[in-house]
């Protein structure tokens, strides 16, 4: 544990949202770098700067299918008086030893093929009779202009400037340039660049493995039949999806019944594949709060610095929270409340930053904005608590959705923002400016 071990706390002491978050982020450390194949590194954070070993493109090449020519040979070319050039060969993409283009000559060239020696420009096939009617003159006229049986010649109907339709060597990036800076997240474009400069592997911080499990004997898996007193387990699905959205590799464990030994055994079994454990439910003061019973700090402090502490936060929803480390590797564990909205809000405020810290990112939090409150009545908030209400945000305005109840999951599904009401504010009037956390 970090500041939790030294912070004085009485039985009724409330932690602030910021204190709890600081305790988490002071404990969580970025994962150790590993070398991965490019596709395995997708979504990971680059550890080192990557420089370009070879220019892109590595040689002058054609951006069109057409003919490689000398500028002087097509100067003044037009429909009435086309330039007639001898075709001396073909240059395909990947050609290692292209033909030389001399005065009065041209070479057929494909897109991406190297510009042959002697050539200064490329004329598209549409500007010639090589397309037999696809250019500025009809196929019949093109044939009439070409000598009988002259398959080794081409007529060009437009002039071309030097370097026309030629991609210059190094026009994308030059050898020695910085390709990607350390800290970059590797998405498809970044992986494409690494492949293009010849990198088969790259050193990254891996995506953290997050194990999510929910607790409660009343929980039933979606698709099964509900009995009296049962509800479907939505939290584990929501938090697993949220962990993946944050960049993690997430594993969902089926709901664990209200039995402390079963829960503790399940958690111990999951440690082998977890860089972070997230539980939901069982952290309040009820008789069956099994997470608290199984992982309370006093009962789990069998290793120096290890254990989970449960605390109350000055926030709504999400007052009961737990945090600490468990197991031989001191794996971080965040215990979230069981109400769906409390669970999800807690994830956004505490778990998501922890995941991104494990990834080695510096931008840990959702973006925030100021917005004008559009509501029919004032928002009420308990004194001394930082409240997070669901809302929809657009064009600098935010509209509350649903009420303050922590079970209102339908309203959560409509929301794309959290409206933040500070601890010292008990009422927010319509038209007031508020801070919002943008979820989308």
Image (tube, grey):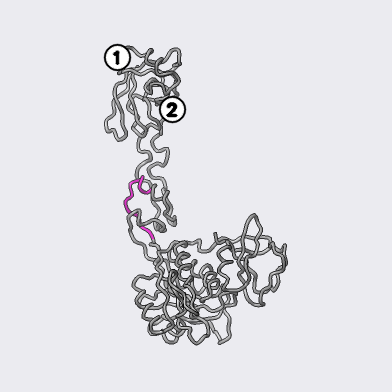
Q: Looking at the picture, how far across and down is residue 77, in whole percent?
A: 44, 16
Give the residue number, with chain letter if any, for mark 1: 149
Q: Is residue 111 above or below residue 278?
A: above
Q: Quadrant of the C terminus?
A: bottom right
- Quadrant hosting residue 400: bottom right
Image position of 180 (left or right of 437): left
Does dot 1 land on a helix, a strand or a loop?
A: loop
Q: Residue furthest left?
A: 97
Q: Residue at x 28, y 26 (%)?
A: 99
- Quadrant hosting residue 140: top left
- How many residues crowd mark 1 within 10 Å: few (<14), some (14–19), many (20+)? few
**Which residue is at the front of the view, 10 or 291?**
291
Q: Is residue 74 above or below residue 372?
A: above
**Disc sitting over residue 431 in the figure:** none
Q: Is residue 49 above or below residue 317?
A: above
Q: Looking at the picture, how far across and down is residue 188, in whole percent?
A: 41, 50
**Disc sitting over residue 164 in the figure:** 2
Does dot 2 land on a helix, a strand or a loop?
A: loop
Question: Which residue range is magenta in the image?
Answer: 193-204
Q: Looking at the picture, how far across and down is residue 377, in whole percent?
A: 72, 67
Between disc 2 and disc 1, whose residue precedes?
A: 1
- The mark lying in front, picked from 2 and 1, is 1
**Which residue is at the front of the view, 335 or 180?**
335
Q: Looking at the picture, how far across and down is residue 378, in whole percent?
A: 71, 69
């Amino acid at each position: 544990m970090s500041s939790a071990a030294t912070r004085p706390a009485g039985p009724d002491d409330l932690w602030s949202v910021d204190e709890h978050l600081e305790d988490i982020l002071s404990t969580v450390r970025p994962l150790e770098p590993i070398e991965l194949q490019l596709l395995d590194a997708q979504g990971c954070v680059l550890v080192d700067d990557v420089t370009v070993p070879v220019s892109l493109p590595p040689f002058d090449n054609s951006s069109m299918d057409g003919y490689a020519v000398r500028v002087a040979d097509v100067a003044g070319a037009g429909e009435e008086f086309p330039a007639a050039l001898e075709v001396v060969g073909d240059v395909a993409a990947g050609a290692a030893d292209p033909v030389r283009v001399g005065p009065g000559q041209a070479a057929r060239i494909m897109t991406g093929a190297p510009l042959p020696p002697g050539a200064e420009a490329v004329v598209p096939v549409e500007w010639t009779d090589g397309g037999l009617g696809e250019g500025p003159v009809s196929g019949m006229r093109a044939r009439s202009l070409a000598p009988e049986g002259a398959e080794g010649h081409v007529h060009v109907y437009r002039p071309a400037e030097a370097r026309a339709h030629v991609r210059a060597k190094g026009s994308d990036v030059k050898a020695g340039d910085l390709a990607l800076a350390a800290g970059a997240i590797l998405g498809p474009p970044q992986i494409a660049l690494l492949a293009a400069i010849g990198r088969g592997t790259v050193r990254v911080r891996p995506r953290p493995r997050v194990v999510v499990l929910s607790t409660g004997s009343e929980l039933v898996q979606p698709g099964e039949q509900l009995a009296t007193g049962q509800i479907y387990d939505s939290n584990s699905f929501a938090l697993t999806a949220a962990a993946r959205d944050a960049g993690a590799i997430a594993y969902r464990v089926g709901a664990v019944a209200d039995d402390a030994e079963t829960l503790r055994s399940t958690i111990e079994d999951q440690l082998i594949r977890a860089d972070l454990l997230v539980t939901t439910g069982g952290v309040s003061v009820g008789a069956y709060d099994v997470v608290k019973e199984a992982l309370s700090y006093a009962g789990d402090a069998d290793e120096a610095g290890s254990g989970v502490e449960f605390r109350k936060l000055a926030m709504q929803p999400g007052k009961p929270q737990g945090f600490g480390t468990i197991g031989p590797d001191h794996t971080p564990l965040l215990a979230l409340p069981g109400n769906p909205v409390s669970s999800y809000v807690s994830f956004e405020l505490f778990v998501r930053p922890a995941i991104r810290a494990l990834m080695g990112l510096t931008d840990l939090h959702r973006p925030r904005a100021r917005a004008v409150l559009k509501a029919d009545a004032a928002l009420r908030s308990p004194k001394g608590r930082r409240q997070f209400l669901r809302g929809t945000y657009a064009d600098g305005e935010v509209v509350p959705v649903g009420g303050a109840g922590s079970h209102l999951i339908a309203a959560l599904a409509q929301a794309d923002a959290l409206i933040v009401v500070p601890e010292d504010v008990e009422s927010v009037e319509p038209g007031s400016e508020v801070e919002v956390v943008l979820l989308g």
